[in-house]
Amino acid sequence: MRILRTFGLACLLLLVDPGSPLSAEAYDPILSGKVTGVVDANTLQFAERRVQLAGVLPPTRGRPEHGQAQDLLHSLTQGEYVWCLLIQEERPEPLRGFCYVRGGLDLADVLVRRGLGRDCPRFSGGRYYLMETKSARRSMNMPDGCF
C-alpha cells in the first residue's frame, strides 16, 4: 500500500514545477513550495497561503504536546520542499490537505505515530487510526467535527 501511495505521489510531482516558490493557486489540487513557517501544531505557512494538515487532530494549545508537535513540524519542513494534496472545501483559509516531504513522508502520519496527534476520520478516511498511540487516545478527546 505504501509503495502505491509513493508511486502515486511521484506521478503527481511530475506535474509540479519545483523551481517556483509556490506552484499552485487555490483552485489547483496541489500546493507546493518551501514552507516559510509553522503556524500551529498542524498548520504550515507557505509564501501566501496556509495549509492545515488533513486528517490529524493535534494536541490542544497549552498542552506540552502542542509545542512538541509544532517543533517537530518545523524540524521536518525547515528548508525542505513540501507538497500538499488539497481537499476541496468551501472555506477559503486555511486550506486543508495531505502534506508530504522528502520522498513521500506524510507529515500527519509522523505526528500520529509519535503520539502528537490523532486520526480525524472525517478528513482522513481512517488512514491514521492504526498508527495512534495509546497515550494519545487517552489524553486527546475526539471532537464531534472529526466524525
Image (spheres, rainbow, N blue to C red):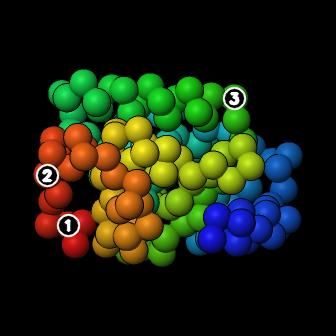
Is residue 9 visible in the rendered image? The answer is no
Check residue 145 in the rendering and tell me which mark sits there, or answer none.
1
Mark 3 belongs to which amino acid?
A: Gly
Could you tell me how many numbered marks the image carries?
Answer: 3
Which quadrant is the N terminus positioned in? Answer: bottom right
Q: Which residue is denoted by mark 2 in the rendering?
A: 141
Whichever of callouts 3 and 2 sits on the residue coming sooner in the sequence is 3
Is residue 145 visible in the rendered image? The answer is yes
Above or below residue 75? Residue 144 is: below
Above or below residue 108? Residue 75 is: above
Left or right: 117 in relation to 72: left
Mark 1 belongs to which amino acid?
A: Gly
The label nearer to you, 3 versus 2, is 2
**Badge 1 density bin: few <14, some 14–19, many ≥20, Cα 10 Å:** few
Which quadrant is the C terminus positioned in? Answer: bottom left
Q: Nearer the viewer, residue 58 or 15?
A: 58
Cα–Cα span, label 1 and label 2: 11 Å
Q: Which residue is denoted by mark 3 in the rendering?
A: 79
Above or below residue 6? Residue 114 is: above
Whichever of callouts 1 and 3 sits on the residue coming sooner in the sequence is 3
Q: Residue at x 60, y 35 (%)?
A: 77
User: Are the two marked residues, 1 and 3, in contact with CB atoms closer than 8 angstroms?
Assistant: no
**Badge 3 density bin: few <14, some 14–19, many ≥20, Cα 10 Å:** few
Mark 2 belongs to which amino acid?
A: Asn
Residue 45 placement (x, y as % from top left):
52, 40
Q: Residue at x 23, y 40 (%)?
A: 135
